[in-house]
Amino acid sequence: MVTHITEEHGISIRQACKSLQLERSSYYYESRARNDKEIISELNQLAEEYPTYGFKKMYHLLRNKGYVWNHKRIYRVYKELGMNLTRKRKRRLPVRKRHALESPEQVNQVWSMDFMSDALYSNRRFRTLNIIDDYNRECLWIEAGLSIGSKYMVNLLDWIIQERGKPKAIRVDNGPEFISANFTNFCHKHRIEIRYIQPGKPVQNAFIEDSIEAIEQRCWM
């Protein structure tokens, strides 16, 4: 409208804005709206791969990928996509990729972890957390207890890493302790790759499964 008046009547922009009761700052304003298509694409991809993750974990994953977007901008897009709303849905696991079960070429390249449960003579249940190095099938630790939660497991891993060094990757199943925030945050912090096996495919974690079977045979001898 301002441009039309200045061209039609040959007056200045200041006079045209004054006649329209329009601030000149509004006329000269240029939108600085940012293109959020890339952020939307990344958040949707993370939501598909990690359906149980919240904003903080998604934000840290984006930072680990090398993106330098401000957390306020990411959270704005996160809310616009409705990801901050609580939704009642059946808990489902993200798609797991099959990793080839190959023998590592050196120690601390890949560890395997799994739980074993049994009962005492009094019928009281107990569990053992078994950790081995896939390179030489060395048993790094067997922790036994009536209850071994994810927080306790992470503290145990931290102690083992201080004594032995950290692995490049850990192979686990989809048990609640291994998909918990405590374990995933611990691995992200130490830059340890988590190699989840596919649900219902224990053979993909055969090294630790064979070790547990050998332990059971010795216990019954």
Image (cartoon, rainbow, N blue to C red):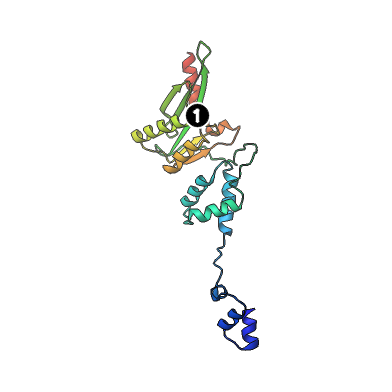
| Residue 77, percent from left and from top | 57, 54
**Quadrant in the picture for residue 39:** bottom right
| Residue 173, percent from left and from top | 54, 33
| Residue 84, percent from left and from top | 58, 46
Q: Residues within 10 Å of mark 1 (few under 14, many from 20)?
A: many
SS of the residue at dot 1? strand
Residue at 43% in and 24% down = 143
Q: Is residue 30 left or right of residue 166?
A: right
Q: Amino acid at mark 1?
A: Asp
Q: Residue furthest bottom?
A: 10
Q: Residue furthest top?
A: 122
Q: Is residue 135 above or below residue 219?
A: below
| Residue 47, percent from left and from top | 58, 46
Residue at 49% in and 31% down = 207
Q: Is residue 120 left or right of residue 8?
A: left
Residue at 43% in and 43% down = 189
Q: Residue 66 or 25: which is nearer the viewer?
A: 25
- Residue position for label 1: 114
Q: Residue furthest left?
A: 163
* Quarter of the rendering occupied by the N terminus: bottom right
